[in-house]
């Protein structure tokens, strides 16, 4: 729980295992604990479309305001919060109830600046 509370953003299971370096048990134990924290509503779990669950302590800066979009680098997997973007629908436009209730996640995928720079260099 302390690792999640001190994180600057949501962390994957493997990132948490690496950070804890065996101090919290084996990877299976860490996963069970993350699942238990999520079920107890002490942590939130999200999947940003890359089939990797990321965890954040509920109420932490890493989980706060998760109604904003996230950018996922399709090359390296880096995830960045995009709080300055806003999704709007036109008045009268039919959208699913989960979108109207703000119970949906917006994901933007592409190359992060580092991966885009690397791709540009390799093309030249």
Image (cartoon, rainbow, N blue to C red):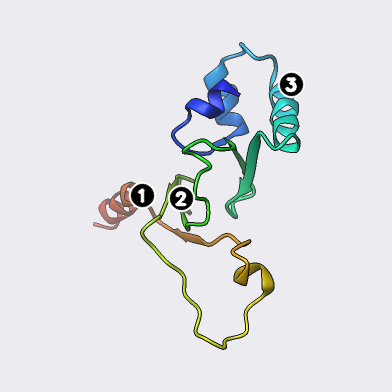
Q: Which residue is mark 3?
A: 29
Q: Nearer the viewer, residue 66 or 47?
A: 66
SS of the residue under disc 3: helix
**Neighbour tally class for label 1: few under 14, some 14-19, many 20 plus, Cα within 10 Å:** some
Frontmost of labels 1 and 3 is: 3
First along the sequence among labels 2 and 3: 3
Q: Whole-Å distance between the Cαs marked 2 and 3?
A: 29 Å
When the figure is inspected, residue 61 is found, relative to residue 123, above or below; the finding is above
SS of the residue under disc 2: loop
Q: Which residue is mark 2?
A: 75
Residue 115 badge: 1
**Neighbour tally class for label 2: few under 14, some 14-19, many 20 plus, Cα within 10 Å:** few
Q: Nearer the viewer, residue 21 or 114?
A: 21
Q: Are marks 2 and 1 in contact (CB under 8 Å)?
A: yes
Frontmost of labels 2 and 3 is: 3
| Residue 23 location (% of width, % of height) | 61, 11
Q: Whole-Å distance between the Cαs marked 2 and 1?
A: 7 Å
First along the sequence among labels 1 and 3: 3
């Amino acid at each position: 729980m302390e690792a999640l509370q001190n994180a600057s953003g949501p962390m994957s299971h493997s990132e948490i295992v690496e950070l804890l370096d065996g101090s919290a048990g084996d990877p299976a134990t860490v996963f069970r604990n993350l699942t238990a924290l999520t079920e107890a509503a002490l942590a939130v779990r999200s999947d940003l479309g890359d089939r990797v669950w990321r965890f954040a302590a509920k109420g932490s800066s890493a989980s706060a305001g998760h109604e904003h979009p996230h950018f996922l680098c399709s090359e390296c997997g880096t995830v960045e919060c995009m709080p300055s973007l806003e999704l709007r629908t036109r008045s009268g436009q039919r959208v699913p109830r989960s979108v109207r209730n703000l119970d949906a996640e917006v994901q933007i995928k592409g190359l992060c600046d580092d991966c885009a720079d690397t791709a540009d260099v390799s093309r030249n």
